[in-house]
Each structure stands twice: as C-alpha cells, then as structure tokens.
Amino acid sequence: MSQHIKDDFSIVIAGQAGQGIQSVSHILTHVLKLEGYHVFATKEYMSRVRGGMNSTTIRVSSKKRDAYQSKVDLFVPLDPNAYEHSKKRFTDETMFLGFKKEDFCSDCIMEVDFINIAQAIGNRVFANAVAAGAILGLMGVAIEQPKEYLRQFFVKKGEDIIKKNQEALEKGHKMGEHFAFSHDVTCSFETDEDVKDDLFISGIDAVGFGALAGGVDFCSSYPMSPSTGLLTFLAQHGRECGVVVEQATDEIGAINMTLGASYAGARGIVTTAGGGFALMCEALSLSAMTETPITIHIAQRPGPATGLPTKTAQEDLDLVLHAGHGEFMRAIYAPGTPVEAYEITAHALDTADKYQIPTFVLIDQYFVDALYTIDKEEFKILPHKKHIVESDREYKRYALTDDGLSPRSVPGYGEGLVCVDSDEHDEYGRITEDVDGFRMQMMEKRLFKRKELLEKDALDPEIVGKKSANTLVVCWGSNRNVVDEAVENIDDKEVSVVHFVQVFPMNKKTKKMIKDTKKVVVVENNATGQFANLLQKECDRKIDKRILKWNGELYSVEELTEKIKDVL
Amino acid sequence: MVTASQQKEDFNVPPEVDNQWCPGCGNFPILQTLKKSLQDLDLRSQEITLVSGIGQAAKLPQYLKTNYFNGLHGRALPVATGIKAANPEQTVIVTSGDGDVYGEGGNHLIHTIRRNPNITVIVHDNMIYGLTKGQAAPTTQEGMVTPTQPEGVIDEPINPVALAISLDAPFVARANAGDPKETQEILKEAINHSGFSLVDIFQPCVVFNKVNTYQWFKEHTYYIGDEYDYDVSNRAEAFAKAVEEDKFPLGVIYAHDRRKTFEDAIGMYAVDKRPLYKREMNCSVRSALLASQK
C-alpha cells in the first residue's frame, strides 16, 4: 500500500500515564510549529498520576484547523494495550508505529521498541526522543531543526544528556524514514513561515494572559481539576507582574478573601470547577449585595458530585445562571478560542469593576488542556483603568444615582468611609429594614437598572456565514471551532454558525435574530440543553433541534458533521 | 501643624443610627472599650476597617465610625485577610461573636492563624447564640439546657485560647467585658502587635444565658498578674495556662514576634509599599512576559 500525507494529518500518541506521552507530544508539537506547520493538540486522560490509558491527538495542518478529529492517520502506541483504547478511531488508512500487539494486523504497521533502543543508548528515558524522531522521520522532516530543538530543551541538563537525546532522535528518525520508504509513504505539506513565531499556548494559559491583560492583581483559589491551571499560571508569574496569589484552604475562604481584597481596591479573580463553585454560591450573593466586583473563572467537568474529574462537559451553565440566594444580576461569558479567552477574561474583569457585579468566565476541561498556535499580535496588553474614585467626607458607598451605579471608593482613599453590608442597607451601607424605601430603591439599583446596563453592553455573538440563513447552528464555549468545521464540511449557504461568547445577558438585537430565524439548532455538552432552554426563555421561541452529548467526551468534527446533517 | 483631621476621633456614629442590642448587653462595654483603645492609639476613622460576620456582636461595626465590611456568617477572617493583603496600610480589626468565629468560621480561624495576616480578631464570647434565640454556641458549657439541646449540651466546649496557641498565633489574650480598663489595655496591645492577634472577651448575654453572668465571670476568672513569674513568649507555659478551666486566666496569655506576617511573606510590599489600589497596571512587565513566550 502507499500513503500520501498532505494538508491535514492526525497523530495519536497513546499509553499509560507516566510513559512519556507528554514529552513526546511536547517535542513533536514544538518542532512541527518551528517547521511552519499549524499544530493543534488535545489530550484525554484518566484521574490518576500513573497507569491507566491516556492519549494525545496532534492535528498537523497546512491551514489552521483547531478542532478535534476522530480519525487517526498515524497511531503511536507507547504500550501494547493502547490499541484497544483507541481502536474505534482507526480507519483503513491508519498507519501504526511503535509497540506491537500480538493479535493486531495492518498493512501499514512498523514495530519499534522505543524502550529497547533507548536502553541501548543508556537509559529508557531516551525513548521519548526515539518516538519523536520516528514520527518526524516518517513525515519527512529534516533532522537538523529537531536536533537543535532538543539541544535547547535539555540545555540545563548538560552535554551528555543533550547528545544522548540527539542520538535517540536520530535512531528514531532513521526508522521513521525507513518506514516511509518501505511502505511508500510520501509527504507534501504546505507550510506557513509565520507559524514559526506564533505562540503555542493552552486554553488555560490564554485565560491567564487575559487575566493579566485585564489588570488582575489578586487571586485566591483552591485547587480543583480542571481549573487549577489558572492558579498555577498566576502563581508562577504573580510576583513579577504584581499579582497577590494565595492558595486558600477551601473555596469559601478563596472567594471571601478575594472579595475582601476587591473591597480594598484590588482587581480579583477566583478559579474553580463546578463543585468548588457550589461552595462559593453564598459569597456570590455577598458580592451582589455589597456590590463588590469579582470575576469567577469556572472550568467545567461532568457531575454530579465528583463526576468525571478529568473529562469535559458544559453542565454548569444552569448553576452559574441561578447560583446565589436572592435576586441579582451577573454577566456570563463563554470563550471558544484562545484569542476569545484572552479578550473575554480581560473584558470580564473590567465589566465586574465597571458595573460592580460578579462576572463569570465559563470554560471546560477540553479547552483548558487543548494547545493552539496563535499569532502573538492577537494578544495585546492594554492598560485598564480601575473604576475607583476618591471619597469626600460626605461619601456614601450606595448613593442613589440615575443609572444605578454608585461611585466606588475604597478604604483609605479620601476623607470618606466605605461601609458595605450583607444586610439590606441604606446609602451609607448601614443596616435597614425600611421595606418601602431603601429595600425597593436598592433592589431597583442592583437588579433592574443593572440589568438594563448589562443588556445594552452585552457582546454580540460571532456569526460565521450569513446572518439571514434559514438555519442557525448555535454553540457556546469550546464547541466553537468544531461546529465551524462541521458546518464548513456541510457547505450549505443556508446554514450559518452563531457562537455566543457572552451567554447572559443578551442584547435585544441578538434576541431578535434568534427569534426571527426559521430553524435554530443548538449544540452543547450536557444532557438537558441548558443553553437551548435559556435561549427559549430569552428569545421567546422554541428551539427546533438540540444536539447534545454528555458522556464526558468532546465532539469530533466527523461526529458533529453527521449529527448536524441529520437535523437539517 | 495640627489640622482638623489630626484631632482625636470620637468614633461616634450619628445619633439616628438605631442600636439593635438589648439593654444591658455585654456588647456595649466592648464597644466603648474598643472606641477608647482606638483613641488612645491615635488612629483616624479612615485608617481602620472593621470586619464582621453575622450575629449581634457582628453588628458592632455599625456603631463605630470607621470603614467596615459586614459580610457573611463565619466568613469575616478571609475577608479581613484579603483587605489586609490588598492594603497593608489599613488597621484591620474583626469584631464578631463566638458562634461566628469559632463555629461557622472555625476552619477559617485555623487557617488564618497559619497564614498570619497582621489583623486583630476580637471575639465576643458570651457562650450562647443570641440572635437566633438561645441555642448552644461552640463555647457553651457542657450540660446547659437550651431549646435545641433539651437534654443539655453534650459537646465539649472549644477552648479558643488553647487552639490559637497550638497554632502558634503571635498574640493570644482573654479579657472580661466587665473590666473595661484591663480590656482596653489588652486591646491596644493586640492592635499594636504585629501578626494575628486573638482577643477572646467574656461577656454576658443578659437574655439567653442565665448562668454565665457578670457575677459568674468574676468568680470564675483571675488575672495573670505582674507578680506571677510568667514568660508570655513561652509556648508550652502559655499552653499550660490556656488549658486551666476551673478558673479561667485573663490577660495576655501568649505573645511573641517569631513569625513573619502574611503581607510581608507575599513579597508584594518589599520594594513598593503602596496598596494595590494606588498602583498603575504594570503593562510593560506583563507585555514582556507575553513577548517572551514561544
């Protein structure tokens, strides 16, 4: 058989946790990016440190393709048991390179015992370089650049380690070339020079840079998968960037500490997952009552309770929408690409400050861990002003104004006093039980006037295709790219994509667009169609079709293409 | 030059503010004592932030002219930590009850002592729940009959002083609301002490606790006097003192300066002393970090 690799190539590396998937992927993705390929990677893993069966899918393309494909072009098993784990993704064209499995047959298979080769060089840890070299050899990538990359990668480990890794890479590379030659595999990829200088960044780091761009200077959070990456990111860069970062001892402490800092004039964010946020709900209500800004970043995973800690879901929209006792306003954002995550996180922090409300950035496990090549120019850090005023002697924290926003001061800034209360309060922030007066005025200010402001300021959804198409395929959050590609595959001018970067509240124009469309299909990762339900209520119409998935896995392009076709 | 703002504050709130405490409540002497302590320390209203949770004691900030954050039940300590970390220039004082700090907020108490922000925590310890009408508090003595413990309290009461010493809190004291002069000195010392300071103040609840009255507290306490050869910075000695429960010792039971405060440890204020709200966003550092990524 012969194979020709071009334009779009999916590599899957699979094995047990701790067998080196991350290292092989790291070398491979970075080298391919330097060669000018667009690279997108997504991993799936089990909730354990060692063992189990995990995989990373690396999609290499000449055109930017940031969505997960099910089909496997090259399968690289680091363990004989990996075949069983990934077999539903194999096609007739799949090539196999790596450990063999007794009863598995294919025309295009080459056994390479990465560990044996590595041990001959001196240590099994060099197996990662052997595997990366073999894949690069198969793809016809010249050896020089990858060798240089390894030199830089291992520079701190000394010359001996560099040399041995390079030797391992070369051994693997030769075997890959041999595989290509013996199985008549040719490769012609169009590369893009500009990709070399791109960022190669995970979804969660895009949120982190967005937080920095948005002027964050305080974060207290409690670790919980899959949200911990943001806490780690800010902890790593906090000192140099002027961010106070503290690991709290529970989520209740985390959010209350951040609210205290925000009251004192910091711009604060907390990061958590659904279960952790459940513990924060009381303090969410406190943020609303005291009008203390905060941004809550939630990386979703399947529930209920502990659920599937390392899998993906969009199950917490209902929770976020309704969380907190009492009635108040909030803004909820759901970025779907790293550039959106960057811009939206900055925007969410600023919106919280500007309107003195809680705001949410809702992402999910899949987006957290996915890796993207991004043009650096897309990430710009602009100064954000703090929406804080100096107080005078007559200062009232909750002064009643026409637009419902009371100028916010902080303790020590001016001659006034800043008094905030979780009880219903008067303009000074003192407890009141004046049910006909202050109660009504404060509710008007917090709820109705804020609603008006936030709806007016709501972000328009992104539309791919024409707005007036007969069918709108609606998505939110991380499904953006996969829905785009599926609809592109369907290639029907009467089918457009509408991606909500802000899911609540919506502006009038958006509601009208949804209401006036002939057919609306909503795609999401939950069992009940939480966003579809919200759209029905907000846009006063029935949602025609819901495409739902809630097993903890993400949609593949192929799967979604078929599912959308089925409902058209 | 003496300006108006440098004259001593009276910390009085306007007379129209409606005080929600019962006549004769032990909260009144604590309020007066705290006011005097703040005056003695020459603090201005603008320099102080009071933080409280929920309960009758937690209403104290309403009656003292300072900044305040009256938050959720049990959650005063993380809020106070956040305020201090964002603005170390503020004098941050928590004033709340035993149920709030030792019950609902018990976990925060433990970990705030570990974190050691330079804040003062004043706990109005009346050994009962007042606002919810007479149920047991974490400090209620065994055997007391209440509406929700009809057979008498079966849980061992918490010993907050021993707990704080076990966690090496830099300043731990116990006071009696019935002794304003002594309490005032203890409070001043607590506020001035660097790091986490706990002052547990015995106070009667005149409505719901008929056992632990002014008289009872008088009979069941004694002051660690000067004549006593007592090393206040010795943790083992302090702990031994703290677990005396037939007669409770009053005064500064443990005090040392061996721990770094949270604000100092986070390193944000080593070079630049300004609170966060006074700082411009450091775009150049953040942009440089982004530019260095590959």
Image (cartoon, rainbow, N blue to C red):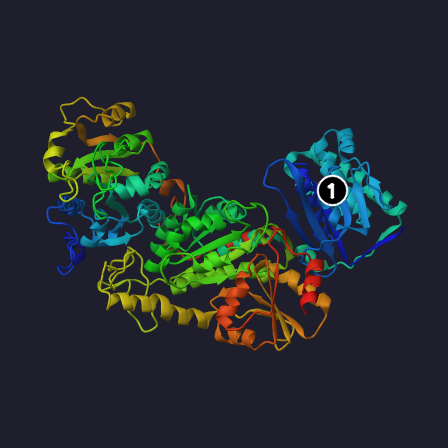
Q: Position of residue A321 (x, y in %)?
A: 46, 60
Chain under numbered label 1 = A
Tell me the kind of residue under disc 1: Glu
Which one is in front, A6 or A475?
A: A475
Q: Position of residue A535 (x, y in %)?
A: 52, 68
Residue plotted at (76% across, 43% down): A76
Residue plotted at (32% across, 74% down): A402
Which one is in front, A499 or A116?
A: A499
Which one is in front, A382 or B128?
A: B128
Q: Which quadrant holds residue A568?
A: bottom right
Q: Which residue appears farthest toward the top when viewing the image? A: B229
- The residue tagged 1 is A84
Which one is in front, A310 or A523?
A: A523
Q: Position of residue A85 (x, y in %)?
A: 71, 43
Q: Is residue B15 left or right of residue A81?
A: left
Identify whether A202 is placed above or below A493.
above
**Under tag 1, what secondary structure?**
helix
Identify whether A71 is placed above or below A155.
below
Is residue A242 shown to the viewer in this render?
Answer: no
Q: Is residue A161 left or right of residue A413?
A: right
Is residue A66 shown to the viewer in this render?
Answer: yes
Q: Is residue A554 left or right of residue A91?
A: left
Which quarter shows the N terminus of chain B?
bottom left
Q: Is residue A345 left or right of residue B112?
A: right
Q: How many badges with numbers are in the image?
A: 1
